[in-house]
Amino acid sequence: MISHLVVALPATLSPGKTWIPSNCRSPCEAMCNFVCDCRDCSDESQCGFHGALPTPGAPFTCSFEQDACGWRDISTSGYSWLRDRAGAVLGGPRPHFDHTQGTDLGWYMAVGTHRGKEASTATLRSPVLREAAATCELRLWYHAASGGAWEGSLYVAELRLELTHGVETLTLWQSSGPWGPGWQELAVNTGRIQGDFQVSWIGWTAQPGAVRRCEIPQASCPLGHHHCQNKACVATHQLCDGEDSCGDSSDEGPLTCSHHVVTDFETGLGPWNHSDGWTLNHNAGGSVGPAWPSRDHSHNSAQGSFLVSMAKPGNLAVLSSPEFQASDPYNCSLIFYYYLHGSEASRLQLLVQALGSSDSQAPVLLRSRHGELGAAWVRDQVDIRSPHPFQILLVGETGPGGVIGLDDLILSNYCRLVPEVSVPQSLLPGPNTLVPWTQPSIQEPQNVCKPGHLSCGELCVPPEQLCDFQQQCTEGEDERECGTTDFESASAGGWEDASVGRLQWQRLEAKDSREPSRDTSRASDGHFLSLQKAWGQLRPEARTHTPTLGPSGPSCELHMAYYFHSHPQGFLALVVVERGSRELLWQAPSSSSGKWTVNKVLLGARPRPFQLEFIGLVDFDSPGQQGAGVDNVTLRNCNPTVTADNDQEVSCNFERDECSWHTGHLTDAHWHRIKSFGPGYDHTTGQGFFMFMDPMDPLARGQGAHLLTRPQIPAVPKECLSFWYHMYGPQIGTLRLVLRRDGEEGTQLWTRSGTHGNRWHQAWVTLHHQLEPSTKYQLLFEGLRDGYHGTMALDDVAVRPGPCWAPKRCSFEDSDCGFSPGGQSLWMRQGNASGQAPWGPWSDHTTETVQGYYMVVDTSPNALPKGHVASLTSEEHQPLAQPACLTFWYHLSLHKTGTLRVHVEEGTRRQVLSISAHGGFAWRLGSVNVQAERAWRVVFEAVAMGVEHSYVALDDLFLQDGPCTQPGSCDFESGLCGWSHLAWPSLGSYSWDWSSGATPSRYLQPTVDHTLGTEAGHFAFFETSVLGPGGRAAWLRSEPLPATEASCIRFWYYMGFPEHFYKGELRVLLSSARGQLAVWGEGGRLQHQWLQVQIEVASTEEFQIVFEATLGGQPALGPIALDDVEYLAEQHCQQPTPSQGDVAPPLSVPAAVGGALLFLVLLMLLGLGGWHWLQRMGCPFRRGADTATSGFDNILFNADQVTLPAPASATSNP
C-alpha cells in the first residue's frame, strides 16, 4: 500500500545539450527540442525542465524550486498532483525533505489525498517535446511511503513511466515494488523519437525528471566527422550502427551503408543460420514477465521484433553466424544490441570459432557481459581479424527471472561469406567447452549440489554464504573471488564491468596502457583495472562491481591503489550498492596527479548484503594523458563475527579513535569523527576530537544518522552511561539514545529535540541488564533529521558500574526517569495519542501535542479519598556545590483539585512549596530553590479534596544552577529560565537560541551581552537568515502570567542588520485564550547596540508574553537578540534615568490601542461617506451574502479598559 508518492528532478553534471548563440527561429519550431536556439535559452523553458544556462555541456533540469516546469496534472477523479514541500505539511506520510536541497524547504511534486470511492489513477504529464536523439536519457527521483493518508489512502499496484508519440504509447519503466525507503533514483533512455512526444508518470500515483544528451546534432562539424544530408554532423563511428544519429536517417541509409548486412529480425534470422534456445519475439507488447523488453531496438516500438533466449536457467542458447572468409589484414566488424535484465546471474558471451585449420581449436572468447544492466538495449562492437575462416557464436545463459535479448546484428563489408558452406554440428560448442568463460572457478558445478551452490569437499555452500567474509571451505574457495585481487588473474577477483556507454572498465596489461606504463608492483607485464573506451551508447560513466558481499563488521576496510587524471571534467569514485540505492564512500581528488596513490576507505558495519562499485568518467578526447586505474584491492577486517581489542570500549573521548562506536549505514546521513574547528569544538579539551553530525554537510538524504556500539556483554545488573551532547541551531531535529537487545525491539532510553543552546550539556541514563550469557546489547545514538539548520555533537561517553544519579532534566518522553510512586502506585506516566485518556491534560508540555507524555494522578474520590496523599519520589540527586533552582510544569484539573506539595528529602523531609488553586487549560511553571550538601530526593505529593474528575499532572522537571528567577523575567546567564522556545510547525518549526559572544558560532550574534557587557555574558537570539521568503517566524514565550490591572515589561534588544538592507522585525505579542495582540514592534535598521524598551500592559485574564522574530522583507543575514527581560507585576513603568543607556519611551497598551481605534473610527467614517457618494454616482457596488467583510480573526484580545470587537458583519464559529 502506498499512501503517497513524489518525485524530484536533480541537477546533473553530465553533458546534455547543444547551445547555438544566435539564430532564434520561430517559437513553434524551436520550442522544447532540447536545443537552445535563443541566447537566453528561453525557447527551452517550461518544457518539463528549465532552459539551462547558455554554456556547452550543461544539462536540462527541473528541481521544482521555482515552478512545475510545465508538467500538468491529468489525473482521473480522486487524485491530483500538487507542487509541495515538507515544510508546508504538519504530518502524514510525505517526505521530510526534498531531494534537491535535502531539507524541508525544498519543493517537489506530490499526489494529494484520494477524495473518491472509485479506483483512480494519478498521472503527471510533460509538455509536448520534440525530436529525441537515440541517446536521450530521463533521470528522476521518486519517493514512495507506505501507510494511510489524511482522509484517504493511495493503493498502488504498479508504477509506470510512459512515452506517447503518435498513436503509440511505450512503457519506459514499470515496477510493482516493493519500493525502498527515501528517495529512489531512476534513469531511463527514451530511444530515438521522431516528431512530437510526451512523457507521463503513472501509478495509481507518480512523476518525471532531468534530461541529457537528447538533442539532434547541429551543423558544427569537427575535422574527420561525417556531414549528414540535413547539414548535421556525426562522428564516423556512428555511421551504419543501427541508430538515427543524424536526425534524418542519412547515416543509416543505402548510400552510406550499402555494403553492410543488417539483421533486425523483422522477417527472420537473415544470414544467421542456426538458433538453439533463441526464439523470435514478434510483439514486445505481449510481455511475459516484468523483465521482458517493452520495445525492440530497430523501431523503438512495441510492434518490433527481436531475438530472445527461451533457454531455462542452466541451459545455453546459441546463435551462430554463417562461415566467414578470413578477414586478415582487415577487420570484420559486428555491431549488435543486447538486452540483459531481471537477473544478476544472466550472461551473454560472444565467441569466435576458427574453421579449416589443421588443429582443432576451442572458441575464443571476445566479449562477456554478466548481470543486471537494466531495461535497455546496449550497443557493442567487435572487430575480428582472422587468418582463417571463422564463425561468430552468441551464447546466452539466462538466470532465474532474467531475460536476454538480441537485436540489430550489423556486419561490415569485410565480413565476407563463404558460399554454400554449412556449419557442422560438431563445431558448435557444448556446455563443457564454454565452462572457462561462463562460470568463475569457484562456481564450477560438481553435480552434487543444487544450482547456485558451491561444492568444496563434502560441503555445499549456499549462495548467501558466498563472499560473506566467513570462510566455509577449507581452502577458502567460497571467499576467493570476492573483491580482493591484484588483477593478475583473468577472473579479476570477481569484479564485473557493468558499463553501458562509451567507457568501460577493463583488465589491462601495464605495457599496453598509455599511462601509467607499470602496475603498482612496478612491473610492466603486471595487470590492473583500467578505464578504456567502449562502444556503448547509453550513460557516459563506466561502472564495475563486485559480487554480492557481506554482511560486514564495523572495522571493515577497503585498501587500494589508484591513479586518476582527467582535465577539466571527470571523476573516480567508490560507492556501495544496497537494495538498489547507492551511497558514495570515496571520491578521488580532482587534483590527482595521475601517479599511483595508496588509499583506504572505511566500509564499516553493514547488516545487509551489498556490492562495491567503482565509477569512473574520463574525457579521452581532451589533450594530455587522461585516464583512471585501480590495482591491489584488498578487503580487510570485514568478518562480522571477529572482535577487535577496542570492541568493548564503550567509554570513549574520541581523541584516539571511535573505540567501539561506529557509524551505521542505513541512510546517507552519517556521524563523523572530526577535530575541533571554528564554531565546532570538543568538550574534552576544546581542541580535540568529537563525533559530529551536520544534516546539511554534505546533503544527507536519509531520515537519520546512526552511531552504535559493537554488541556488548553486560558485566553487572546496572550501569550508568554518561555523555556530553551539543544541539545548536534554529531547526536542529532530535537526538535519542536507544538500547537494543538480541531478538528484541529497541528501547528508547533518552531523547532531546530542538536547540539546547550553544554549549555542551551532560546527560546520563541507567542501563538495566539481564545477566545471561546469551544476552548481548547495543547502544545506538540516532540523530533524526526533522530539522535542517544546526548541528549535533557527542563527546566523552563513559560507563561505570551501578545506577546513575537522578537526571537533571526529565520530560517523561522516554520513561518515568526513575520516579517511584508510593503506596498504591497511583501516579502513572501517560500520553493521550489515542484521545481516550480517562483523565489528565489533553497534551503534554514538552511537545504540546497528544503524542507527548507526562506524569498524572487521579484525585477523584474513587481513586484517592479526600485527605489522602499520593506521593511521587525521585531517585537520589547528587549533592549540590551551589544553590540550584528546580523548575517543573504542573497542570491542575478545572475542578478544585486539592493541593500539590513539594518536599526536599535530605535525611529528613522538608516542605518547600505548596500549591492549592483552581486549575485551567494551561500548564503552569513552578519553581523551588534547593540547597543540599548531601544526596537528596524531591517528593511531589497530591492531596485529594474529594472532587470528581480531578487530577494533578507534572512535566518537564529541570534542575539548573543559580537561584530561581521571578515569573516572566530572565537575564539568560544560566539558560532561558521559564521562557519556552518550542518550535511551532505552523511558523516553520524554528527556535530562538541561547549563546554568548565568547562561544564560537556558525551564526551571526552579538559580541557582548547586556547583563555583564562582556563576551562571557549570555543572551537569547535568533538568526533570521534561515527563515527564507514566506514571512514565517520564531516565538519565545513566557510562562502563563496572572491577570493584571497594570504591569510593566522591560527588556533590552539588539539587531545586527546592515543599513539600507532588508530588515528583521521584533514584535511583542500578548497571547491569551481569546487570541493575540501585538503591543510593540521594531524593524531592524540599527546595528551593534543594545536598546531598552518598556511596555505597560493590562489584562483581565491569564496571558503570556511572546517575542516574535520575523522578516520585514526578503531573507537577510542578521541576528535579533534579547537580554535582561523583566516582568514587573502590578507595577507601572517608570521613566529611566539617562544613565541607563539608550531607551525607548514607555508604551501604554491601552493608550496605544485607544489611539489606533480612534484612527480606525475616522477611517470608517470616511469610508462610509465615500460609499454613499459612490452610490449616488451609480457605482455598481453589491451587498449581500456573497460579499465578505474581513474581521479581527485571531487577533482579538481583551485588556483592561480596551476591547477590540469584531465588525458587525463578521461571523464567528462556535
Image (cartoon, rainbow, N blue to C red):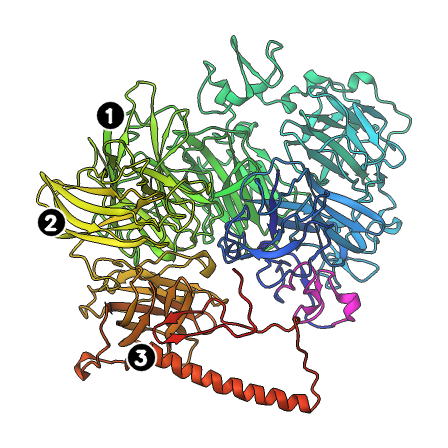
The stretch in magenta equals 24-52
Most foreground residue, 431 or 1166:
1166
Q: Tell me which amino acid carries mark 2.
A: Gln
Is the C-beta separation of discs 1 and 2 under 8 Å? no
Is residue 38 found inside the magenta-colored segment of the image? Answer: yes
Q: Nearer the viewer, mark 1 or mark 3?
A: 3
Residue of label 2: 931
Q: Marks 1 and 2, how far apart in space?
A: 32 Å
Image position of 1122 with respect to 470: above or below: below
Is residue 121 found inside the magenta-colored segment of the image? Answer: no
Q: Nearer the viewer, mark 3 or mark 2?
A: 3
Apparent side of residue 1020 relative to residue 561 in the rendered image (left or right): left
Residue of label 3: 1147
Residue of label 1: 717
Other residues around mark 1 within 10 Å, as few (<14) / some (14–19) / many (≥20): few
Mark closer to the chain start, 3 or 2: 2
Q: Marks 3 and 2, how far apart in space?
A: 40 Å
Report the residue at 32% width, 48% height from top. Answer: 793
Apparent side of residue 823 relative to residue 785 in the rendered image (left or right): left
Total marks shown come to 3
The quarter of the rendered structure image containing the N terminus is top right
Under circle 2, the secondary element is loop
- Say whether residue 659 is visible: yes
Mark closer to the chain start, 1 or 2: 1
Q: Tell me which amino acid carries mark 1.
A: Pro
Other residues around mark 2 within 10 Å, as few (<14) / some (14–19) / many (≥20): some
Percent position (x, y) of residue 205? 67, 46
| Occupied quadrant, residue 936 | top left
